[in-house]
Image (tube, coloured by chain):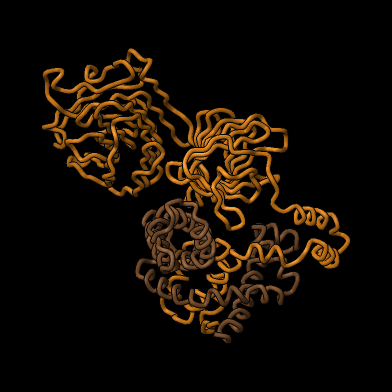
Chain colours: A brown, B orange
């Protein structure tokens, strides 16, 4: 039996909401540009919403959503000027396969993230919060801290790297 | 977690740091692609890194909940010197505020527009208040209108996404699509600002339209003035003017022609009509000749006269400007619906020497848009968009040439975006023109812009 015809099905919205993070990770891996990845994710959401009646509860939502995402990435690439793309066509399948494999660890890493964030220094935690929760521009963070945007960019990279190690230790260890 | 080999590790770290912050230029992007192609271990690190960025981006609630405001305040106060006290107070006020209702409401709604708030998607029609941080999306066939407390009106056209803001810099971010705005005069020092991926529009009181995509921001001002800023450069776009901003700069387009053919009874002195019969059109001995009787005014606009009407030969009728407008130009023509039509708009030369953009709203000829040229005495089609043009409604046709790029829109929908490399004659007269092509059009208006010096 398919979903109810009404498009505002709570179950479907719930599924879409739960998959936003991993869909973004997948699209971002294929595009290499966070802003464009956000745009494509919106298009993916619109297609998923539009075609929600095609989805059968109990079937693999993730596989369907990733397939839609893949097509939307391809469509986005066709609209771009070629030399502005980060990756060439021959890389796309390699990246798609790798991103899907990497997604297998998504849930476990997500579960561990809160604990890993708590292990950061207060200063680093605040920087991550400003950047991701508030969307504060690099330059603004740098101004308040009396440093340069480049230095903040490097610090953010180190923090992400630390978090990657942290969630991997726990997640892979308990796999 | 995988670790990339030491050989490329520092470079990869720099590239990925930049990538997450949108600081990856094309040269670095190519290098990243090359590294990922050649180093499987770097690839795994890349996937882990993308995933972490995604995890943090979707951990909005977790990040906000990590500390309560009282603890946050103590830590901030302990961590900074007294000399920075004013900054800290400002920071605390900002943190304590959080997303709050903004002084605006949805005043009109059509179609399934929705809001993304706290990672949840909600129908726009169900919202009782709008908050800073809300992302409003109008999909295809949807529009919505917001009214602010100061009387400002923002219409979101279809396929548009905005994010509401409530700070000193901007009221909203236009992330994709187009908005039409009417903004009453703003208090000094408190302009109505709109951010886009490439630019910032600062408004003091005006009516304008703003389009944004991942690669460009375009502005059209109806009245008043809007400052468009990008990458440290800015232009003031006045009434009737246009602005465009990309990663490589910002351009102001000034109007040079504004013809309202619906009210005319005689041809403006700046225009002239030429004719060349079909048999010699692509021959080197073609000789276009003056043909004022091939174009005439009818009720509701200007039209091209068919050869059969005059009991004479068929051929290309060209209405061109007698003055040069340069290579870079924007043309906009409005054609009424009701019957089949076709129209050529030419840039960088007249229809004999420039790039022709053929709009064909017909049945018997391939319906759609094409870019071609007959400058080399043969018909060379350079780009095509086969999507049909309906002839049961009015259409606004737009063509822009900037550098080697030609873009074509119908009713603000991009139909062709192409690089043109086919050379044109060096000694040509750099103007624009309209021309016939099969079923004659009725043209209501024609407007022309060129870049400000």
The residue at 56%/31% (across/down) is B207
State the image quarter where residue B390 is shown.
top left
The residue at 50%/60% (across/down) is A11
Percent position of residue A2, x then y: 39, 59
Asked whether, in this view, residue A161 is left or right of residue A102, the answer is right
Percent position of residue A163, x then y: 63, 76
Front-most of residues B281 and B386: B386
Asked whether, in this view, residue A132 is left or right of residue A88, the answer is right
State the image quarter where residue B357 is shown.
top left
The residue at 60%/53% (across/down) is B117
B379 lies above or below B449: below
Percent position of residue B381, x then y: 23, 45
Percent position of residue B156, x then y: 52, 40
How many marks the image carries: the answer is: 0
Asked whether, in this view, residue A73 is left or right of residue B122, the answer is left
Q: Residue furthest top?
A: B265
Q: Residue furthest right?
A: B82
Front-most of residues B9 and B177: B177
State the image quarter where residue B360 is shown.
top left
Asked whether, in this view, residue B6 is left or right of residue A149, the answer is left
Front-most of residues B105 and A155: B105
Q: Where, quadrant-wise, is the N terminus of chain B in this rendering?
A: bottom right
Q: Is residue B243 visible?
A: no
B432 lies above or below B370: above
Q: Is residue B222 visible?
A: yes
Front-most of residues B317 and B151: B151
Q: Residue furthest bottom?
A: A173
B168 lies above or below A136: above
């Amino acid at each position: 039996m398919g979903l109810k015809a009404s498009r505002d099905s709570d179950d479907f919205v719930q599924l879409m909401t739960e998959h936003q993070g991993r869909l973004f990770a997948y699209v971002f891996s294929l595009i290499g540009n966070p802003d464009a990845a956000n745009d494509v994710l919106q298009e993916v959401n619109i297609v998923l919403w539009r075609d929600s009646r095609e989805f059968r509860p109990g079937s693999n939502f993730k596989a369907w959503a990733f397939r839609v995402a893949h097509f939307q990435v391809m469509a986005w690439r066709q609209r771009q000027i070629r030399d502005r793309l980060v990756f060439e066509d021959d890389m796309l399948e390699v990246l798609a396969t790798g991103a899907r494999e990497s997604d297998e660890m998504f849930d476990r890493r997500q579960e561990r993230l809160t604990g890993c964030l708590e292990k950061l220094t207060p200063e680093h935690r605040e920087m991550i919060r400003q950047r991701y929760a508030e969307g504060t521009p690099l330059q603004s963070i740098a101004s308040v801290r009396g440093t340069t945007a480049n230095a903040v960019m490097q610090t953010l990279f180190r923090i992400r790297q630390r978090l990657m190690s942290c969630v991997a230790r726990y997640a892979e260890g308990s796999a | 977690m995988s670790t990339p080999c030491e050989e490329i590790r520092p470079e990869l770290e720099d590239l990925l740091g930049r990538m997450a912050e949108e600081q990856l230029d094309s040269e670095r992007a190519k290098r990243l692609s090359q590294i990922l192609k050649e180093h499987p271990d770097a690839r795994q690190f890349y996937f882990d890194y993308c995933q972490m960025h995604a995890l943090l981006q979707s951990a909005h609630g977790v990040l906000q909940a990590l500390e309560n405001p009282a603890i946050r305040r103590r830590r901030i106060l302990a961590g900074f010197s007294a000399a920075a006290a004013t900054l800290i107070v400002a920071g605390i006020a900002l943190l304590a505020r959080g997303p709050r209702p903004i002084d605006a409401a949805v005043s009109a709604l059509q179609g399934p527009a929705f809001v993304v708030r706290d990672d949840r998607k909600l129908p726009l029609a169900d919202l009782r208040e709008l908050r800073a941080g809300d992302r409003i999306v109008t999909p295809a066939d949807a529009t919505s209108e917001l009214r602010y407390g100061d009387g400002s009106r923002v219409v979101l056209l279809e396929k548009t996404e905005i994010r509401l803001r409530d700070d000193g810099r901007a009221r909203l971010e236009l992330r994709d699509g187009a908005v039409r705005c009417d903004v009453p005069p703003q208090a000094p020092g408190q302009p109505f600002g709109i951010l886009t991926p490439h630019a910032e529009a600062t408004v003091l009181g005006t009516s304008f339209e703003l389009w944004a995509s991942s690669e460009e921001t375009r502005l059209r001002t109806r009245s008043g003035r809007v400052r468009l800023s990008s990458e440290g450069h800015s232009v003031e776009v006045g009434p009737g003017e246009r602005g465009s901003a990309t990663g490589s700069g910002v351009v102001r387009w000034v109007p040079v022609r504004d013809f309202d053919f619906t009210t005319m009874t005689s041809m403006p002195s700046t225009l002239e009509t030429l004719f060349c019969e079909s048999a010699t059109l692509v021959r080197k001995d073609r000789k276009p000749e003056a043909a004022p009787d091939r174009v005439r005014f009818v009720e509701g606009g200007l039209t091209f006269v068919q050869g059969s009407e005059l009991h004479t030969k068929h051929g290309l009728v060209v209405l061109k400007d007698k003055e040069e407008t340069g290579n870079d130009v924007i043309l906009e023509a409005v054609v009424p619906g009701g019957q089949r039509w076709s129209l050529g708009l030419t840039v960088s030369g007249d229809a004999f020497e420039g790039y022709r953009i053929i709009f064909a709203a017909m049945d018997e000829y391939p319906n759609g848009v094409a870019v071609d040229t007959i400058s080399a005495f043969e018909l060379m089609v350079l780009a095509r968009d086969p999507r049909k043009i309906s002839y049961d409604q009015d259409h606004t046709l737009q063509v822009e040439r900037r550098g080697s790029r030609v873009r074509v829109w119908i009713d603000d929908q991009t139909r062709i975006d192409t690089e043109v490399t086919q050379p044109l004659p060096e000694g040509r007269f750099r103007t624009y023109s309209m021309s016939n092509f099969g079923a004659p059009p009725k043209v209501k208006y024609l407007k022309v812009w060129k870049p400000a010096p």
